[in-house]
Image: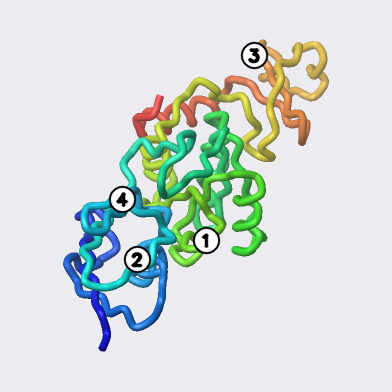
Amino acid sequence: MKKNIELYFDTELSDFFRVKSGISYPLDRRASIKDIIEAQGVPHTEVGEIFVDDRPVNFSFIASGGQKVIIKAVQAPFEIFKPSLLRPNSFKNMRFVVDVNVGKLAPLLRMMGYDTFFDNELRDKEIVLLAHEQKRVVLSRDRALLKHGLIEFGRLIRSQKSDEQLKEVTAFFGLNCEMIYTRCMRCNHLLREVKKEQIVHRLEPKTKKYFYRFSICHGCDRIYWPGSHWEKLNKLMKIARIC
C-alpha cells in the first residue's frame, strides 16, 4: 500500500511555478525531499526552508509517509555568506556564472564590479562544474539546470528584459554599487587607473580633448573613460532603481 505526504508550498512558489499547494504526494519509491520538491517543478535553489511536521529538515531528508511538508521560498536578500540547514557550505565571495539565456546580465553585473563568468558556448555540465569548483552563484532561466545537486546557490530569473533582470538580481542578493566601474564589462578582469599620457596615442581626437580620467583592463587592454557609454549605464541603473 502506497503512503502519501502532504506538500504545502509558499504562495510565491505555487504562483510562479504553477504548483498546487496542499497536494497529496504518493511515496512509491525512496526519495529525498529535494527530489520530491523538484518533481513538482521547483528547483532547490528557490527553496529557503523545509519543515516536516513543524520540524526543519535538510534536502537529504527521506519522508516516510503521513507527514505534512511545508516548503518556504528563499527570502531576499539571499544570504550566501552564512551557513544554513539547507546550505551548510556558505560562500566567501559574491561571484556569478551566467548562462546563455540571461547573457545580457553579465556585462551589467561586471559594470557593478561583480566577478561574473559568461561564455555563450558553455554547456550546462560545464556551468555546473564551474559553479561548484569556483563557488559561483548560477543565474539562469533554465529550471533543469538549477535542479543539479552540485549547484548550491542560484536564482531562476523571472524577468525577460535585461534592466529588469539586473534589478531583480540586485534586490534578491542585496547587491550594492560600492565597486561600480572597477571591472571590465567585456572580459571580466579588474580595471586600473592609467595616466592619460600613457594611452593618449590610442584616443580619438574628441576623447583626447574632453576627458582626463581613464582606466584600462588588465585582461583585454580595453580603455574606459566616463563618456556617453557610462551615461547610458547610469541611466539604466536609475531606471532599475539600483544606484
Q: Nearer the viewer, mark 1 or mark 3?
A: 1
**Disc number at residue 56?**
4
> In the structure shown, which secondary structural element does the residue marked by tag 3 occupy?
loop
Choose between 92 and 225: the one closer to the eye. 92
Q: Disc 2, disc 4: CB below 8 Å?
A: no
Q: Is residue 13 left or right of residue 115?
A: left
Give whichever of discs 1 and 2 has the lower sequence position: 2
- Amino acid type shown at disc 3: Phe
- Judged from this view, the residue extending furthest toward the left is 22
> In the structure shown, which secondary structural element does the residue marked by tag 4 occupy?
strand
Q: Is residue 35 left or right of residue 3?
A: right
Q: Which residue is mark 2?
A: 37
Alpha-carbon distance for marks 4 and 3? Answer: 58 Å
- Amino acid type shown at disc 1: Gly
Alpha-carbon distance for marks 1 and 2? Answer: 13 Å
Choose between 159 and 149: the one closer to the eye. 149
Alpha-carbon distance for marks 3 and 2? Answer: 55 Å
- For the point 57% across and 39% down, the residue is 95
Residue 157 location in percent, x, y?
41, 52
Choose between 115 and 58: the one closer to the eye. 58
Give whichever of discs 2 and 4 has the lower sequence position: 2
The image quadrant of residue 125 is bottom right
Q: Nearer the viewer, mark 4 or mark 1?
A: 4
How many C-alpha atoms fall within 10 Å of the one at disc 3: few (<14), some, or many (≥20)? few
**Disc number at residue 149?**
1
Q: Which residue is mark 3?
A: 211
> In the structure shown, which secondary structural element does the residue marked by tag 1 occupy?
loop
Q: Nearer the viewer, mark 3 or mark 2?
A: 2
Q: Is residue 30 above or below residue 174?
A: below
